[in-house]
Image (spheres, coloured by chain):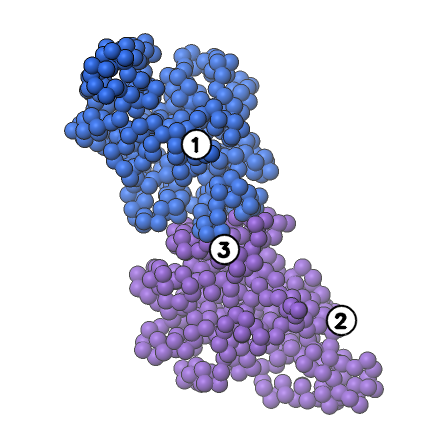
Chain colours: A purple, B blue
Amino acid sequence: MVEFIVTPWEVKGKVDYKKLIEQFGLKELTPEILEKIKKYTKQLHFLLRRRIFFAHRDLDWLLAEFEKGNKFYLYTGRGPSGKTHIGHLIPWILTKWLQDKFDAKLYFQMTNDEKFLFKRELTLEKVDEFMYENMLDVIAIGFNPRKTKIIRDIQDISLLYPEALKVARHLTFSTVKAVFGFKESSNVGQIFFTCLQSVPAFIESVLRKRNVPCLIPLAVDQDPHFRITRDVAPKLGYYKPAIVHSKFLPSLKGIGEKMSSSEPETCVFTTDPPEQVEKKIMNAFTGGRDTAQEQRKYGGNPQICPVYYYYLFFFEQDDKKLKEIEESCKSGKTLCGECKRMLIEKINKFLKEHQRKREKARRIVNKFLLK
Amino acid sequence: MVEFIVTPWEVKGKVDYKKLIEQFGLKELTPEILEKIKKYTKQLHFLLRRRIFFAHRDLDWLLAEFEKGNKFYLYTGRGPSGKTHIGHLIPWILTKWLQDKFDAKLYFQMTNDEKFLFKRELTLEKVDEFMYENMLDVIAIGFNPRKTKIIRDIQDISLLYPEALKVARHLTFSTVKAVFGFKESSNVGQIFFTCLQSVPAFIESVLRKRNVPCLIPLAVDQDPHFRITRDVAPKLGYYKPAIVHSKFLPSLKGIGEKMSSSEPETCVFTTDPPEQVEKKIMNAFTGGRDTAQEQRKYGGNPQICPVYYYYLFFFEQDDKKLKEIEESCKSGKTLCGECKRMLIEKINKFLKEHQRKREKARRIVNKFLLK
């Protein structure tokens, strides 16, 4: 029985991350490797401490190279098929921290071509509208404009295409079929696309004409693309990119439910006004009991509660306070209504600031573009 | 039994053009349609008169549109995987004539990406060296620099890519498999490539923001690409391109033998010096008899003679003189040696002039480029 599905275009069911590590052939993010990171960063980011980033590929190698003075660059991205929601921000926030701590250059890829190829209902114009809006969110995160370049696939295709052709020569239909589950009825653009997503994983080596290590923080569903890159890059003379993988912020409808930009009630968008946030959170599924009385008596279950995961993933970064939230839920001390109201306040506080930065970002978008 | 194979990447065996018309679903170039062309061109080009261009798609429609005042543009191209040989010039020569007679704009596509994807031994640098050399030949043909644009796929990818994505959405692996015979082991670039070859067939409509008819003169092996274009273009709101198809100049080794840039003895390159031409033609297979005596008695057979086809396709454009060559072969009056020496003289006369124009072309390449 398939309990869950994780591909770049579909995440379904309750994801068992331990099983995913096995299925994908990842390495667990162990205390040992976190210690190695801490050597350079002094503190550990809460997304690492809490194992929201839970797995990696070749992070040990990357850190050993860094130790030798061989600095790495960062690469992450976004497929602009809709508004940005809080879940999208998770890998970006760690990426920003890594940029600061390791003084790393970042390529941020906007796969507007991908979204056009995979979403029949979208026009090129619509994808680019989403892309612009998503870029505002990326910039609002606070990336260093002197060290960050946004690659827009279609607009920057002249940079990517010659390198994508080199990847393509090493990649057969039977491989992309095995990796992504493509069928004979898949369109030929979908089949070729992964080549474009590979390129930023070695573009710095192309441009600098010497091998530069690359670290890709991503949500784990994107890993299959880079399994291909890691297979092909050495054949082109480049390093395999290292990767750190994050879990998914659950849907507000419940763990294992699909979170989707096309179902606004399942997630909080970065552009939601306070009333919208309030409504969404108040309607969210929780780990609470059927009645207040029962909850006082038996306590709630944070492990199945999206509200708790919102604290865990983002809105309570202090471990002690998070523990308190968890405990007063389990002991029945805090009921869901109160807990939700506290979260709404935190989300709206964050969004007020984020939306201000987002508006300011409009003026500096050009600084982040390649051309 | 397969007697011959014609695909964009392989031509093998003695091609039966009547059967090919059936197989590919083409229309024969009839006296009626040639008369319609003649209405605008006064004379008929020898390549049309002799049915070296032998088939078409929608040429009647194109001429009817022209009659209504709806002018067409031309599109042809070259895959730059080696030197230009005489056979390559055939479609270009008719294209040049059509440009002059119909005052038509021309897009000439250089598919450097294709050749990189299909020829494992080529680097991008090597393909672009061939491309530059091939462009000199194109320009030497005499295309109007004010009405001709050379599209270099990789260099001009930013123009082509967004449109290629639109084609890709309408094209599945199972279609390219059926049309081109791709396998699971085909690389993903090969599978996507045909989308790039489609784009110039409607690019003028994209750029002018109104529908412009397109006529593609090509060697018949390229037809499969445009079967796809003709299927997809209407779905994007564009006209189906019209096509005129040429036969292949045979190999110097004999009809049905493969002519290949990688086997220099099978063809005459545009850059061959006179001694090289002499050697190649003197070594060519002919329709002659085993001995001079037998030939005087029984005559030769022009129908199986590459030397005769060189006259037919290019080097004797006067129908009366061509008939004389044919007759004095069949009657045994002219022996192969004499016939070959006459051809060598004609080829070298042409090449001397072509090579001079080719050198002059170096100074004006930029006029033909998009950017």
How many neighbours does mark 3 have within 10 angstroms: few (below 14), some (14-19), or many (20 or more)? Answer: some
Residue A174: numbered disc: 3
Query: Where in the figure is residue B199, as x and y percent of width and height?
Result: 48, 39
- Identified by mark 2, the residue type is Asn
Image height check: is A61 above or below B288? below
10 Å crowding of disc 1: few (<14), some (14-19), many (20+)? few
Q: Name the N-terminal-most of marks 3 and 2.
A: 3
> Residue sitting at 49 percent across and 55 percent down?
A174
Please report, as a chain letter, where disc 2 is located.
A
Please give the name of the residue rendered at 31% of the width and 36% of the height, measured from the top-left corner. B260
> In which quadrant of the rendered image does the C terminus of chain B lie?
top left
Q: Secondary structure at mark 1?
A: loop
Mark 1 sits on what residue? B3
**Mark 1, mark 3: which one is toward the viewer?**
1
Q: Is residue B112 left or right of residue B63?
A: left
* Residue occupying the point 66% across, 89% down: A324
Give the residue at x 34% y 79%: A67
Q: Quadrant of residue B317?
A: top left
Provide residue B253's location: percent of width, then percent of height. 28, 30
Q: Is residue B137 left or right of residue B337?
A: right
Residue closer to the observer: A194 or A275: A194
Q: Secondary structure at mark 2?
A: loop
Looking at the rendered structure, the kind of residue marked 1 is Glu
Three-letter code for the amino acid on which mark 3 is drawn:
Ser
Does label 2 lie on the same chain as label 1?
Answer: no
In the drawing, what numbered circle is on residue B27? none
Q: Are marks 1 and 3 in contact (CB under 8 Å)?
A: no
Tell me residue A364's x, y (percent).
48, 61
Distance between mark 3 and mark 2 Cα atoms: 45 Å
Provide the residue designation for mark 2. Answer: A283
Label 1 – label 2 distance at C-alpha: 71 Å
